[in-house]
Image (cartoon, rainbow, N blue to C red):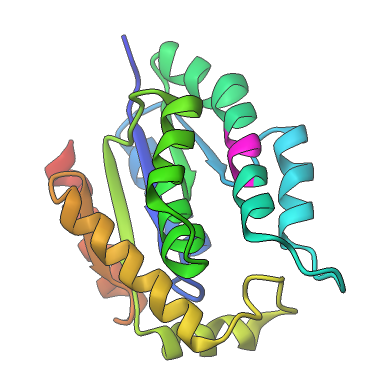
Amino acid sequence: MTGRFITVEGTEGVGKSTNLAFIEGFLRSRAIDVITTREPGGTPLAEELRELLLAKREEPVDACAELLMVFAARAQHLNQLVAPALARGQWVLCDRFTDATYAYQGAGRGLSLETISKLEFLVQGSLQPDITVWLDIDVRLGLERARARADLDRFEEEDVSFFERVRAGYRARAEEAPARFCRINAGQPLARVQADIQRALEAFL
């Protein structure tokens, strides 16, 4: 029996960590065997690549180099963790996946969507999430939340216009796959956000 693949997407400050924990708890309460992971990351090598991607540095990071590191981490993650878990019948809950690449490296950095699509097919073939929970928020509110909590990584230091493009990229992805995407207004109080998430998951189940 093949497991199910759930991804959670969103820009900075949407509350992904809190809501991932909520989703994991919801699934476990229904006796679902779930693994929670993240991208970039999820395996030792992929986590090392994540550190390289997020680290602030004096040398400018070429957008194409960034894209290739993302997919290198994804290839390792999929082959070592995600695909084996799904084949065992486990559910996989992932903090970001390829939609983030289209949003951040595509819409945000301006890289070719065709190039991203080719890399997507090379690395993951036909694999797509069964459902994507998109935590959507006003960019300025999200950045205000993100910048209040900790030191910023290389992505979080980008300006508002970058994140506006990223948000538009997510919107475009949601419009292309409305049956898979579930948009959640993450600007609401947490209790309402999680009530909306639970309704979406109950419908999915």
Q: Position of residue 106 (x, y in %)?
A: 44, 59
Image position of 29 (left or right of 155): left
Residue sitting at x 71%, y 79%: 150
Magenta stretch: dominant secondary structure: helix
| Depth check, front residue: 145 or 65 | 65
Residue range of the region highlighted in magenta in the rendering? 70-74
Of the pair 56 and 133, the residue shown nearer to us: 56
- The relative height of residue 85 versus residue 157 in the rendered view (above or below) is above
Q: Nearer the viewer, residue 16 or 74?
A: 74
Work out which residue is located at the far right of the displayed protein and give it: 58
Q: Position of residue 40 (x, y in %)?
A: 61, 46
Q: How many marks?
A: 0
Residue lying at 63% horizontally and 43% vertically, measured from the top left: 68
| Residue 75 placement (x, y as % from top left) | 59, 29
Any magenta on residue 162? no
Q: Indicate the quadrant containing the C terminus: top left, top right, bottom left or bottom right.
A: top left
Residue visible at 62% across and 86% down? 147
| Residue visible at 72% across and 56% down in the picture | 53
Image quarter in which the N terminus is found: top left
Q: Which is more toward the observer, 80 or 2?
A: 80
Say above or below: 193 vs 126. Answer: below
